[in-house]
Amino acid sequence: MAKNTKMPAIAWLRVNEWMMGWMSYELGGKMMVNGRRVVCMQHLDGVRDILRMETVDDTELSPDLPVELSLSAQRYSMLQAAMTLSPEAAERMYHLSSEELQDFVPIEVPRVRLTEEGLLRPWGGDTMFGGKQAKELVRLLREAFWEGVELFARRYAREHEGEAYAQEDMIVAFCRETKTSELHIEAIRREWQRRCKRAEG
């Protein structure tokens, strides 16, 4: 099989399931990996500084390495193959279920990254986000998600000016537009209402 030279360098990031529809809708590029749309974050404010943080080499692919917020492209492929063969055995060996593997999304990364030794090196298939780096990326994505909800809420309010509607109606419309599963409507609504109350003081 010919190598896809147009494929960007990627690493996998664990995010909340209720953000995935919006991420694919708002940040998804044209490239697909393992049936998942590659997320492009380069235009988000603050992301460049985060992507310049230290990365981690995942060269040994040891089963003892704990899975937290990030996976290298190589480790993700290995886990997916193992789970295809035997989900139960893979979960016992790698301490990650096939359901949990679905919590990871492919993120397009720079061609060059900073190693743990402070060196600039190409981003390889065995590179994953560093711990602090992954946490900061998740934080940035959450902020962008709620900014997206807020922008949608303003537009929805303009389109329904003079009408009485529940906040849940707006959240349902947001989920439909972004192709977010209806299973997440209640969780998004609750958090949105909490955020609105905090904003009101």
Image (cartoon, rainbow, N blue to C red):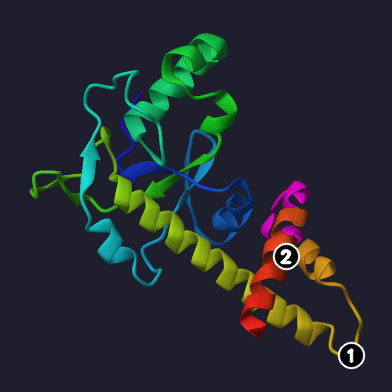
Label 2 crowding class (10 Å Cα cut-off): few <14, some 14-19, many 20+? some
Tell me residue 12's x, y (percent). 41, 41
Label 1 crowding class (10 Å Cα cut-off): few <14, some 14-19, many 20+? few
Q: Nearer the viewer, residue 37 or 167?
A: 167
Q: Is residue 29 above or below residue 48?
A: above
Tell me residue 184's x, y (percent). 72, 51
Which residue position holds label 2?
A: 174
Q: For the C terminus, which image quadrant? A: bottom right
Q: Say whether disc 2 or disc 1 marks the residue closer to the N-terminus.
A: 1
Tell me what residue is drawn at x 34 percent, y 64 percent: 47
* 167 relative to 148 in the view: left or right: right
* 201 relative to 103 in the view: left or right: right
Magenta region includes residue 180: yes
Tell me what residue is drawn at x 37 percent, y 58 percent: 136
The single residue placed furthest to the bottom in the displayed view is: 162
Which residue position holds label 1?
A: 162
Most common secondary structure along the magenta stretch: helix
- What segment is highlighted magenta in the picture? 174-184
Magenta region includes residue 5: no
Q: Is residue 58 above or below residue 174?
A: above
Circle 2 sits in a helix, a strand or a loop, which is it?
helix
Q: Is residue 36 above or below residue 138?
A: above
Say which mark, if any, is on residue 187: none
Q: Is residue 127 above or below residue 163?
A: above
Q: CA distance from mark 2 to mark 1?
A: 19 Å
